Amino acid sequence: MKFLLAFIILVIAAVLVRKLLRFKTLTPLLPRKYNFGKRRDTLREVLRLLDERGARVLLETGVARMGLEKSKGDGASTIVFGLWAKQNDAHLYSVDIDPEATQRAGQAVAEMGLSDNVTLVTSDSVAYLDDFTETVDFLYLDSYDYHKTDTAIQTASQDHHLKEIKAIEGCLHDKTVILIDDCDMPNGGKGKLVIEWLTGRGWKVHMSEYQVILVQST
Ligand SMILES: C[S@@+](CC[C@H](N)C(=O)[O-])C[C@H]1O[C@@H](n2cnc3c(N)ncnc32)[C@H](O)[C@@H]1O
């Protein structure tokens, strides 16, 4: 009986420790209660690079449609980069094809007091990036949803992200930081073709986890 009790306590302790280790916060940018899971370390590194490089123009494809609610599942990117923009006198442009997604993200942005530093646009991202004229200091690619098993969706998503990078290439410079989401996925994830294309043009993979960071120079 004693052994069984000790075993149960040990299992509960192990589960709690595992949970704690997987709970990854972005403090002090956001309160401790928000878990950024597998994206936390790449997000932290991106924010460090943006600080170091004094980024001013941030651009992302795929808005945080659930605001901070899905910090672990989706990344809450618009809030994370919007907050950084507010604290650093920068501006985030965020585009999404789904009007409901931009509307919801707009609510979250307003609730966080970020409206002056975030512009949300409803459009196909490739068309929007094609027309974008400002010099981009940070680019985050996270639009066309990937799929774990459907290879047709995987290919379509990879093609779409490749079109995005080709559309915005002319606005990038040698200190631009690029982040791509959902890369550690079957068949290479969203970044497969983009990374091949960028590394063929002198970009370097700076950090590769679930998300991938690329830069030209360190
Ligand atoms: C994974 S979600 C973005 C998650 C967000 N970055 C976050 O951190 O919460 C992908 C988004 O891409 C959008 N999307 C899909 N196809 C698109 C396209 N062609 N142009 C722009 N946005 C697109 C979807 O509407 C969806 O809101």
Image (tube, rainbow, N blue to C red):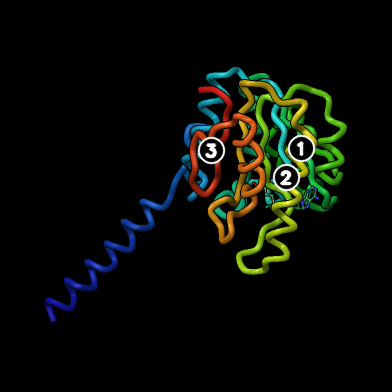
Tag 2–tag 1 contact (CB < 8 Å): yes
| Place of residue 60 in the rendered image (x, y in percent of width and height, measured from the top left) | 71, 38
Q: CA distance from mark 1 to mark 3?
A: 24 Å
Mark 2, secondary structure of its residue: helix
* Viewer-closest of 135 and 191: 191
- Kindly tell me whether residue 182 is visible in this rendering: yes
Q: Quadrant of residue 130?
A: top right
Secondary structure of residue under mark 3: helix
Residue at image mark 2: 162
Q: Is residue 163 above or below residue 172?
A: below
Q: Given the image, on which type of amino acid does mark 3 rest?
A: Leu
Nearer the N terminus, badge 3 or badge 2?
Answer: 3
| Residue matched to label 3 | 43
For the residues marked 2 and 1, what is the alpha-carbon distance in whole angstroms?
6 Å
**Residue beneath the point at 81% across and 43% down:** 125
The image's mark for residue 166 is 1
Residue type at mark 1 is Lys
Q: Indicate the amino acid at tag 2.
A: Leu
Q: Nearer the viewer, residue 56 or 195?
A: 195
Mark 2 Cα within 10 Å, few/some/many (few <14, many 20+)? many
For the N terminus, the image quarter is: bottom left
Give the label, 3 or 2, closer to the camera. Answer: 2
From the viewer's perspective, is 168 left or right of 54?
Answer: right
Q: Measured along the vertical axis of the image, is residue 164 above or below residue 51? A: below
Marks 1, 3: nearer the viewer: 1
